Image (spheres, rainbow, N blue to C red):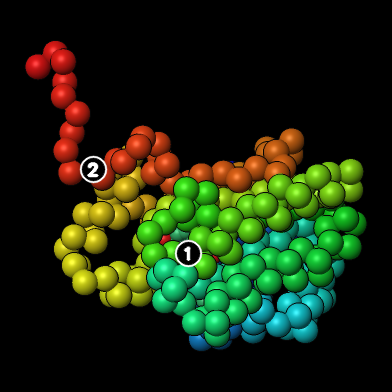
Amino acid sequence: MNSRLHSKVALVTGGAAGIGAAIVRRFVAEGAHVLVGDRDQPHGAALCAELGRATAFQVLDVSDADSFAAAISRTIAEWGRLDILVNNAGIALPATTVQDTSLDEFEQLVSVNLRSVFLGCKLAHPHLKATRGCVLNISSMAGVTGQERHAIYGATKGAINALTKCTAVDWGRDGIRINALCPAGVRTETLRQWMKTQPDAAGIETYLNQIHALGYCPEPAEVATVAAFLCSDEAKFITGYVMPVSGGSECGYNIHAPVSLADPHS
Ligand SMILES: NC(=O)c1ccc[n+]([C@@H]2O[C@H](COP(=O)([O-])OP(=O)(O)OC[C@H]3O[C@@H](n4cnc5c(N)ncnc54)[C@H](O)[C@@H]3O)[C@@H](O)[C@H]2O)c1
């Protein structure tokens, strides 16, 4: 294992499960100290108990400014600095169209997915300026290519991508980098919940594999290793980048089309 994050101090939101937990594991394996911030106390505390003194758990609701400020303060209290903020916490449901989304559902998606990224960046800025640190936003290909029945979710992710690029310009001279990662599908609890909302269970498994050009839906660890790279000094000249970690899902016109094009050699 590399030590690309030796002595770095990170706050990972939504770090109790899924992609966030994989990022926590990877960051610790690469030498970082990590505050796991999540509204899920049992899973977050269990993860920190397993990983030991390089981690600490803090109950965090990313949509609440006071809660976010407390998580950043706790990070500074534990390890004296903040080098990396990973804005990972997010929700995907309800995944539907504009016309079928209620105003309350719209506001919930915007609050947890987008307002949180604004809050985290704003509150972390003075600390990241002091360390010449970085932010990594876990976004989605739904905010790049669009996705059927994901109008508001996709809109929050598209806005995160724009915030990432604009803020990279604003913060570059402070030496703060900010990037976004865009998975297509990743095998996590969010994905399993979404699968349960689909009528064709067998078909959705095939769909999830076939939307990726590489032919399978990845595990969270495959996203976490890219997160570690982007937050390490190996990526010190990368900022404002919205990076697909999508197995090529965005390539080709319609990779899961029901017919294949003719092979002129056959
Ligand atoms: N799984 C996928 O297929 C996929 C694809 C693209 C993007 N993403 C993005 O990756 C990120 C992580 O998703 P995941 O699949 O690992 O989800 P997950 O549901 O497995 O884990 C999300 C974690 O965030 C926490 N969380 C939710 N709301 C919170 C809040 N208000 N405050 C603090 N913590 C909160 C949950 O408790 C949970 O521990 C999300 O931003 C999601 O949009 C996921």
- The three-letter amino acid code for the residue at tag 2 is Ala
Is residue 231 placed above or below 61 in the rendered structure? above
Q: Quadrant of the C terminus?
A: top left
Q: Is mark 1 within 8 Å of ligand 1?
A: no
Q: Position of residue 162 (x, y in %)?
A: 67, 52
Instruction: State the residue position of label 2.
Output: 257
Q: Residue furthest left?
A: 266
Q: Position of residue 192 (x, y in %)?
A: 33, 70
Is residue 160 placed above or below 230 in the rendered structure? below
Q: Residue furthest front?
A: 99
Residue name at image x 84 percent, y 67 percent: 80
Q: Badge 2, how many Cα within 10 Å: few under 14, some, many 20+?
A: few
Label 1 to label 2: alpha-carbon separation: 22 Å
Q: Is mark 2 within 8 Å of ligand 1?
A: no
Residue 231 appears in the figure: no
Is residue 82 placed above or below 77 in the rendered structure? above
Residue name at image x 18 percent, y 44 percent: 258
> For numbered disc 1, what is the local secondary structure?
helix
Residue 198 appears in the figure: yes
Q: Position of residue 247 (x, y in %)?
A: 40, 42
- Figure quadrant of residue 49: bottom right
Are the two marked residues, 1 and 2, in contact with CB atoms closer than 8 angstroms?
no
Instruction: State the residue position of label 1.
Output: 151
- The three-letter amino acid code for the residue at tag 1 is Ala
> For numbered disc 2, what is the local secondary structure?
loop
**Mark 1 or mark 2: which comes first in sequence?**
1
Is residue 208 placed above or below 119 in the rendered structure? above
Q: How many marks are shown on the rendered structure?
A: 2
Q: Badge 1, how many Cα within 10 Å: few under 14, some, many 20+?
A: many
Q: Position of residue 174 (x, y in %)?
A: 89, 48
